[in-house]
Image (tube, rainbow, N blue to C red):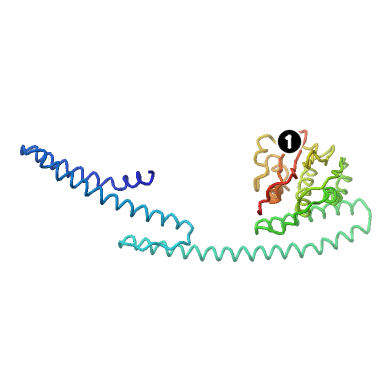
Amino acid sequence: MKLFLRYLKSRRGVLLLFAAFFLILAVSFALYHLPAEAVLYPAALCAVLGLIVLTLDFLRVRRRHRVLSELQEMEAALPEARAIEADDYREIILQLREMNRELRTKAEAGRSAMVDYYTLWVHQIKTPIAAMRLRLQEEDSELSRSLLSDLGRIERYVSMVLTYLRLEEGATDYVIRETDLDSILRPVLRQFAGEFISRKLKLDYTPAETKVLTDEKWLAFVAEQVLSNALKYTREGTISVYLEAPATLCIRDTGIGIAPEDLPRVFERNYTGLAGRADMRASGIGLNLCKRVCDSLGHGISIQSVPDQGTTVRIDLGTRKLAMD
């Protein structure tokens, strides 16, 4: 019906012209005092003929409309033109389609080259980082502990870059299996041990003692990013890691919290919020990556926060349909 109304609107000029012709004939016959049947009968014949032509024209338009609607895929074949103007438009569309195809090819090639370069860079930078860590572990001093903490942040930033590249390329290297949650969390917590000690923050870790269906590597990345944020915005107090029944991992801190107006947008890419703008190190990417990873793993992630009281991140590890399915 909507298409039919659009069609009538496009043909209103012809319909008005036909009505004008009928009105002229009716007025002329009336002026000459001729019988009304003399104009009504031919007008009715013309109306029937016009209705038939209008119906056939509408069917033709509807058929072409369906074909043109399929062209939104940018791959379907263009219908043959039946007029000079339509043929000109068809040639323009074909040229634009070819230009678009060339631009997409160049963009994909450029993107592929960029991803290859940064992937290579990430793997190469890991070698000097590992070498520096080995050298710093040979001595135990305040300076070495501080440098190890900074080196840990560098490693997390490198891991974030690699995760971003994998997600942008549509990573499918998920290995979903039943895994002991504590075996994932303990190595992550160990990474931050030096930072907890140097900043005199308390870690309250309650072993989960449960198994979850997940990917160890990707879930470890999420936990790492959440803990990194908790440490970044907690000046004093405690960071708690525990499990809520039945299978929700909770990471709670006593940090500066998140403003209520920022909470609905914390998972948006590049959104840093008030706290992030105050901290020049904030990129607005970490939580976005966590959300995307959780979505791919079939996990839920949510945040509750009160300014100046702290933040709680909940990761629902219950079994759900995976995004890659």
Q: Is residue 46 left or right of residue 188?
A: left
Place of residue 240 in the rendered image (x, y in percent of width and height, measured from the top left):
83, 40
Q: Quadrant of the N terminus?
A: top left
* Residue type, label 1: Ser
Q: How many marks?
A: 1
Q: Secondary structure at mark 1?
A: strand
In which quadrant of the rendered view does residue 127 lie? bottom right
Determine the residue positioned at 65% across, 35% down.
261
145 or 177, which is in the foreground? 177
Q: Position of residue 248 (x, y in %)?
A: 77, 41
Which image quarter: residue 94? bottom left
The residue indicated by pointer 1 is 305
Residue name at image x 77 percent, y 36 percent = 310
Residues 183 and 266: in front is 183
Q: Is residue 36 left or right of residue 290?
A: left
On the image, the x and y values in percent for residue 256 come to: 76, 37
189 versus 31 height, above or below: below
Residue at 62% across / 62% down in the picture? 111
Residue 15 lies, with reference to residue 113, above or below; the image says above
Residue, x 82% and y 60% (percent of image)? 129
Q: Residues within 10 Å of mark 1 (few under 14, many from 20)?
A: many
- Measured as percent of width and height from the top left, residue 137 is found at 91, 57
Residue closer to the observer: 73 or 151:
73
> Position of 147 compared to 298: left or right?
right
Q: Is residue 94 above or below residue 204?
A: below
